[in-house]
Image: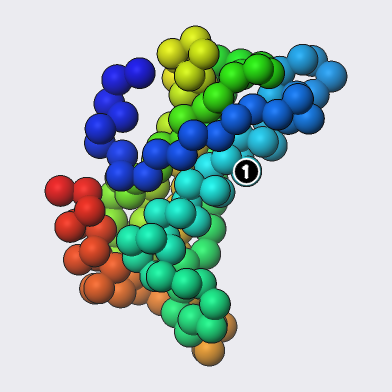
């Protein structure tokens, strides 16, 4: 499982029996839940702090998942998350999910995160303090 060192957020999540579907592998929606766990960890730990009572915060605008290797119970996944690209009005993030049992990449998920002004109910530019925090983390 190479290139784990480039991810500041790495969560180990045990696969539950209930995560599997009728095809006896983890249901596709569970991968998105795992990515959400890592995304929230990254955002609250490094960018915004608590997401309660914020006036400008991150919202998920898009996500794409490429399924590579099926995960089955019993296993533990390592869910890694980082910001891959900063644009004026969005962050492009990468989440990789690894099967610990098979030491294989199971999925890659790309998230687009926008800054949202909860007072004026519209998107906003990515705040400079977010950019600076991300650059500190990812460099």
What residue sits 54% from the left and 48% below the top? 37
Q: Is residue 49 above or below residue 7?
A: below
From this view, report whether residue 74 is shown above or below residue 112.
Answer: above
The image position of residue 78, as x and y in percent, is 46, 30
Q: Quadrant of residue 121?
A: bottom right
> Element under label 1?
helix
84 and 136: which is toward the camera? 136
Residue 137 lies left or right of residue 102; in this view the side is: left
Say which residue appears at 41% left-offset and 70% top-offset. 49
> How many dots with numbers?
1
Q: Quadrant of the N terminus?
A: top left
Q: Which residue is the site of mark 1?
A: 33
The residue located at (25%, 32%) in the rendering is: 5
Residue 88: x and y in percent read 29, 65
What residue is rendered at 29% in x and 68% in y?
Answer: 130
- Judging depth in this view, the residue of 115 and 55 nearest the camera is 55
The vertical placement of 43 against 107, above or below, is below
Asked where in the image residue 19 lies, by quadrant, the reply is top right
């Amino acid at each position: 499982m190479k290139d784990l060192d480039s991810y500041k957020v790495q969560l180990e999540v045990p696969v539950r029996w209930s995560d599997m579907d009728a095809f006896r592998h983890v249901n596709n929606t569970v991968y998105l839940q795992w990515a959400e766990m890592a995304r929230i960890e990254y955002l609250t730990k490094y960018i915004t702090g608590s997401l309660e009572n914020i006036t400008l915060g991150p919202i998920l605008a898009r996500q794409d998942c490429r399924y590579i290797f099926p995960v089955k119970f019993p296993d533990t996944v390592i869910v890694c998350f980082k910001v891959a690209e900063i644009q004026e009005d969005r962050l492009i993030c990468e989440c990789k999910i690894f099967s610990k049992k098979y030491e294989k990449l199971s999925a890659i998920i790309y998230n687009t995160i926008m800054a949202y002004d909860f007072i004026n109910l519209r998107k906003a530019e990515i705040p400079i303090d977010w950019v600076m925090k991300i650059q500190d983390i990812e460099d």
